[in-house]
Image (cartoon, grey):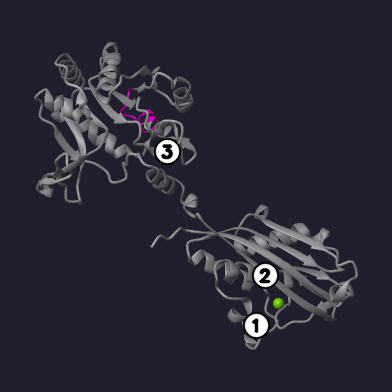
Amino acid sequence: MPIGSPRPKVAVLLVAAGKGLRAGGAVPKQYRIVGGKTVLHRAIAIFAHHPAVDLVIAAIGPDNHSEFAASAAGLPKVLPPIVGGATRQASGLAGLEALVPLAPDIVLIHDAARPFASDGLVERAIRAAVEHGAAAPGMAVTDTIKIVDDRERAIATPPRATLRAMQTPQAFHFTLILDAHRRAAAAKIEGLTDDAAVAEWAGHSLHVFQGEAGNMKLTNPEDFETGERLLSPLAALGDVRTGQGFDIHAFEPGDHIWLNGVRIPHSHKLNGHSDADVGLHALTDAVLGSIGAGDIGQHFPPSDPKWKGASSDQFLAYAASLVEARGGKIANLDVTILAESPKIGPHREAMRAAIARIVGIPADRVGVQATTLEKLGSIGRSEGIAALAIATVRLPWVTR
Ligand code: MG
């Protein structure tokens, strides 16, 4: 197509007819969820939202009309699907025949199982097709490739520099690839595994342009795990830890206490080197415990004069910073206050807000409970206040 001609009419054919059960699970892999959406939805969306694409059609399995409709819902430019054939090659031809009345200039043919192709790759594919007639993205290979015989005996080692691992979207002048597919079918050629091979069989020269490492094909269960990680950094925080903390401080003469980061007027104060906030101390130990980082006394020794009268929010903030330094997130904190008095209820929301602010999480991830000890034991005799805490944190899985 000469420079200066109007923008070509671009159709996209998504090949989604495969049963694709290698990925595990009961539904074909293109209908599996990755990052909260089906693989097919993501693949369609790449093209439906691309300004250079005019229309999208999919070749699907005969039993997947409702799954397709759910995956395509809300996306523009999508035509009703057609039912694909028994092989990859047959599905390609069926999709191309369906496009004949629409007479596109260029057709991109894309594996539905590649949901991560970038806008830039689509752009390059269209340009390469306009210029070369038949083009496909390829990646240099890093593994040495062997050709083996039927007894798994290596019989050849092709020079690695000459090899490319092929991806999609493969891009063609529409009439070129339609004609190639029709001739291949008429010649009873079957089982070609990509459309580039069909074009090559028909005698066309195929231009290979640069693919993308991220344009992976979701095939095996591990590919879906990788896909989840790419789409949702939080989902990658699969290393869930819990930690517990306990603290107790005795009353002494005074007129207020600090509890869970809130100042509360009271008949006594709590004795301690810092502000003696038992709630924040227990929470600090819980967070430290969740990452195996010791306890509060180790990080903030009472023997160190610099912590005298210290506000305990800095202890908890420090523990939270250790989680952050490991690439983690605090999922939730929960603290139970054991005290005959003061009443916690009137302060509960202020406490949740204070704890949430200190560690930088939403208040709905913080729980504050309280109970009396029914006048039993030292707490029951109002000699002091104790606190129990638990923390749940999520760290990145680090595989070694
Ligand atoms: Mg303490």
Mark linked to residue 24? 3
Q: Which residue is mark 2?
A: 245
Residue at horizontal 68 percent and vertical 72 percent from the top = 281
Categorize mark 3 by other alpha carbons within 10 Å: few (<14), some (14-19), many (20+).
Answer: some
Disc 2: residue Cβ within 8 A of ligand 1's nearest atom: no
Q: Position of residue 210 (x, y in %)?
A: 20, 42
Query: Which amino acid type is shown beneath numbered disc 1?
Result: Trp
Query: Which amino acid type is shown beneath numbered disc 2?
Result: Gly
In three-dimensional space, the C-alpha distance between marks 2 and 3, rounded to whole angstroms, equals 41 Å
In three-dimensional space, the C-alpha distance between marks 1 and 3, rounded to whole angstroms, equals 56 Å
Q: Left or right: 248 with respect to 326? A: right
Q: Position of residue 291 (x, y in %)?
A: 54, 67
Q: Which residues are magenta?
A: 44-55
Residue at horizontal 28 percent and vertical 46 percent from the top = 213
The reply to whether callout 2 and callout 1 are in contact (CB within 8 Å) is no
Categorize mark 1 by other alpha carbons within 10 Å: few (<14), some (14-19), many (20+).
Answer: some
* Quarter of the picture holding the N terminus: top left
Residue at horizontal 66 percent and vertical 85 percent from the top = 302
**Residue 53 covered by magenta stretch:** yes
Q: Quadrant of residue 182?
A: top left
Q: Nearer the viewer, residue 75 or 147?
A: 147
Q: Left or right: 136 with respect to 248? A: left
The reply to whether callout 2 and callout 3 are in contact (CB within 8 Å) is no
**Residue 45 covered by magenta stretch:** yes
Q: Quadrant of ligand 1?
A: bottom right
Q: Which residue is mark 1?
A: 307
In three-dimensional space, the C-alpha distance between marks 2 and 1, rounded to whole angstroms, equals 20 Å
Q: Left or right: 297 with respect to 293? A: right
Q: Viewer-nearest of labels 2 and 3? A: 3
Residue 132 visible here:
yes
The vertical placement of 385 against 235, above or below, is below
